[in-house]
Image (spheres, rainbow, N blue to C red):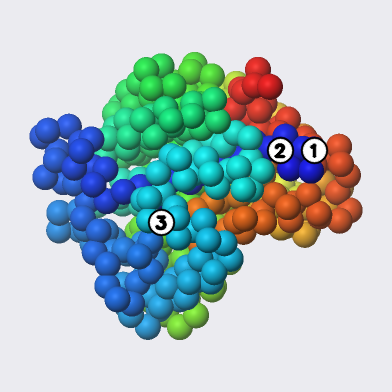
Amino acid sequence: MKNGFRVLDSDLHTMEPDGLWERYLDEPFKRFAPRFVRGTHNAPNQPVIQIGDLAIAEMSKRPHTAVVGKDLQRRAFERHPHYEIAHARGYDSESHVGAMDIEGIDVAVIYGTRGRQVLMHDDLDPKVAAALARAHNDWTRDFCAYRPERLKFAAQLAFHDVGECVKEARRAVRELGAVAVIGNPNPINGRHIHDPEFEPLWDAIEELGVPIGFHPTGQSSLRDDIARRYLDHPNGRVIGVAGRNPMELMMAFGSMAAGGVLERHPRLRCAFLEGTCGWLPWWLWRLDEAWEKFGPGSEVQISQLPSQYFFRQCYVATDADEKVLKQVVEAVGDDNIVVSTDYPHSDGLFPHAIEEFVALEGVSEKTKAKILWDNCARLYNLTALQ
């Protein structure tokens, strides 16, 4: 609770231990367990990830730009002593629940950090990517078992092989208890999420009755990634971070709505996470305008305007300190907005995220209550929680 509000965090992260994949990977794939290389210039929480011959920079490979992340982490750790405690404990379940208590979060839906970074790269073998996802989901299930009434989880999916993706979605929800699956907004190997190949996945998720949370991976080494053009360039971290997540989520919603997926799957729920919400009113208007002009001659037809699919089936996460939330609510209402804190990432607001949200001016108490709990409980089908 925070100032009398129940709080359900739509997107709180794990910071996975280096040895996760050595412990949880199926035996034939253990040799592909990621290795994490930390130089003196990188923040300890932002290593270079090595999978076989593939090196993935979480944020940067070059010392002169890696120092940006190290400075950010230093300032985050100075905000509250719990960061040092959590880091020393390897960001385990107990320290996560302790952080939730400090922040005032009652229940959190857990999303991975390195789990996304290690398995969504274009160049991974599809079977390896699927094995990395399975291992991560098994570990996350065990992570949440510490306090299952407070820790829920969204399952990783690797989009390289749709058949494997469908199998893992079903296993994670039916056997492991995942309350959502995680979708990648970026194309993988040139294949967008509204391509016909993905239809079996949308069928399966619709049948399972869980939402798909579209969440950028947090690193810019994917082949088709808006921030990649700024990787290791002067002030590239500033420019890339400011634009990347919102723009990738905008394009993902465009695929799902204007690309016809939500038309064909009316029971599919989607969340667009960690990309703020200020873009939403303009983007809905822009997509509608583009559809009215170019839609009639397009290959795939939809029966409604793109914006209507958002209100029917989608949610967007606001940052806790997003001052334009007032204008967003005025433009699109408050039924489809949730909140996330992004703990324990250094660019989050811990321990003041929920405090800052509650203090936002121009947003009613009723709207705050809906965004802090009601909408998120509806999104993840957790309305039975008290």
**What is the spatial separation of the Cα atoms under label 1 and label 2, in whole angstroms?**
6 Å
Q: Amino acid at mark 1?
A: Gly
Figure check: 253 above or below 80: above
In x, y percent, where is residue 198? 41, 32
Q: Amino acid at mark 2?
A: Met
**Residue at mark 1:** 4
Disc number for residue 87: 3
**Residue at mark 2:** 1
Q: Earlier in the sequence, mark 3 or mark 1?
A: 1
Instruction: Tell me if residue 210 can be seen.
Output: yes
What's the residue at 64%, 48% (across, down)?
103
Quadrant for the C terminus in the image? top right
In x, y percent, where is residue 252? 54, 46
Figure check: 267 above or below 155: above
**What is the spatial separation of the Cα atoms under label 3 and label 2, in whole angstroms?**
25 Å
Q: Element type at marker 3?
A: helix
Along the line of sight, which residue is nearer the eye, 345 or 179?
345
What's the residue at 71%, 38% (across, down)?
1
**What is the spatial separation of the Cα atoms under label 3 and label 1, in whole angstroms?**
30 Å
Q: Quadrant of residue 353?
A: bottom right
Left/right placement of residue 375 relative to residue 275 reads: right
In x, y percent, where is residue 85? 45, 55
